[in-house]
């Protein structure tokens, strides 16, 4: 499913509406404020700026942003970890961790999150040598769960009261 073609530069793509052009590319430090702003707009899980800076510096190839008309409208922020595998039980693995995903409401349902995720997964595999990828998602977040299922993720666990308002998280994972 993830093609082996190496892609490094910006990719110009057409939205599912057949008319919105968007670009997906690796993050740069110039995107910091835009990413922070989108995160605050679309998710209750917000982080201090240094947290984003750390991910931009350490895992830039798997931190993907999308632009429409030169404006950043979405991001996928990832990191790399070593620990127990969610796929091969009882074994350890180098794992990609999708930390945060967001697309501005006006740019949704165009396939942008899907395209950013596919590119992040490819980078996690090809540049960071991870063999699986996982994330946490609110059990009530049907749109995101559906997005991840379409990308081959499956629920592998549930963390009670993971979020500060008391909601549970699903852990979803897939091999790379
Ligand atoms: C690890 C984490 O960060 S978990 C939190 C994820 N982020 C959020 O929930 C923030 C708020 N939501 C968003 O930013 C967006 O709605 C996202 C990121 C979930 C989806 O972004 P989009 O660019 O709209 O996704 P995309 O267009 O690629 O949709 C792919 C599939 O996801 C599913 N999906 C996306 N939005 C919805 C929705 N509102 N209702 C139902 N399914 C949806 C659909 O299966 C969709 O395919 P389809 O359009 O062919 O039906
Ligand atoms: Zn997480």
Image (cartoon, helix red, strand yellow):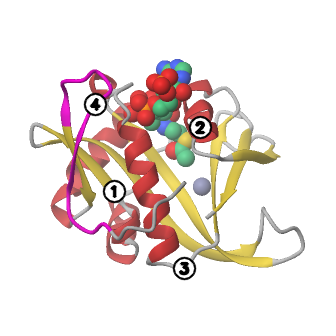
Q: Distance between the residues labelled 4 and 3?
A: 30 Å
Residue 163 in the image, given as x and y percentages of width and height: 65, 41
Q: Considering only vertical position in the picture, is 142 above or below 119?
A: above
Q: Single out the residue that lies furthest toward the left.
A: 70
Instruction: State whether label 2 is within 8 Å of ligand 1.
Output: yes
**Residue drawn 71% across the image and 41% down it:** 169
Sequence-wise, which precedes: disc 4 or disc 1?
4
Answer yes or no: do the residues labelled 2 and 4 have beta carbons within 8 Å? no
Q: Give the range drawn in magenta.
A: 7-21
Instruction: State whether label 4 is within 8 Å of ligand 1.
Output: no
Q: Does the magenta stretch include residue 36?
A: no
Residue 132 in the image, given as x and y percentages of width and height: 65, 66
Sequence-wise, which precedes: disc 2 or disc 1?
1
Q: Considering only vertical position in the picture, is 175 above or below 140?
A: below
Q: What residue is shown with label 2? A: 150
- Please give left or right for residue 172 compared with residue 92 in the image: left
Q: Which of marks 2 and 1 is in front?
A: 2
Q: How far apart are marks 2 and 4 (CA)?
A: 17 Å
Residue 80 in the image, given as x and y percentages of width and height: 54, 73
How packed mark 3 is, by other alpha carbons closer than 10 Å (few <14, some 14-19, many 20 or more), is some
Q: What residue is shown with label 1? A: 64
How packed mark 1 is, by other alpha carbons closer than 10 Å (few <14, some 14-19, many 20 or more), is many
Q: In which quarter of the image is residue 141?
A: top right
Task: Choose between 94 and 49: the one closer to the eye.
Answer: 94
Count of marks, rendered view: 4
């Amino acid at each position: 499913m993830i093609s082996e073609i190496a892609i490094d530069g910006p990719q110009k793509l057409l939205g599912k509406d057949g008319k919105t052009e968007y670009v997906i590319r690796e993050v740069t430090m110039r995107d910091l404020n835009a990413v922070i702003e989108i995160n605050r707009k679309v998710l209750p899980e917000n982080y201090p700026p240094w947290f984003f800076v750390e991910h931009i510096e350490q895992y830039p190839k798997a931190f993907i942003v999308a632009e429409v008309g030169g404006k950043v409208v979405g991001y996928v922020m990832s990191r790399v970890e070593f620990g127990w595998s969610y796929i091969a039980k009882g074994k350890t693995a180098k794992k990609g961790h999708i930390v945060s995903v967001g697309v501005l409401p006006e740019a949704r349902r165009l396939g942008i999150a899907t395209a950013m995720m596919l590119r992040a997964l490819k980078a996690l595999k090809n540049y960071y040598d991870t063999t699986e990828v996982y994330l946490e998602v609110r059990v009530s977040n049907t749109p995101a769960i559906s997005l991840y299922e379409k990308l081959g993720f499956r629920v592998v666990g549930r963390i009670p009261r993971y979020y500060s308002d008391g909601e549970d998280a699903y852990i979803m994972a897939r091999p790379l």
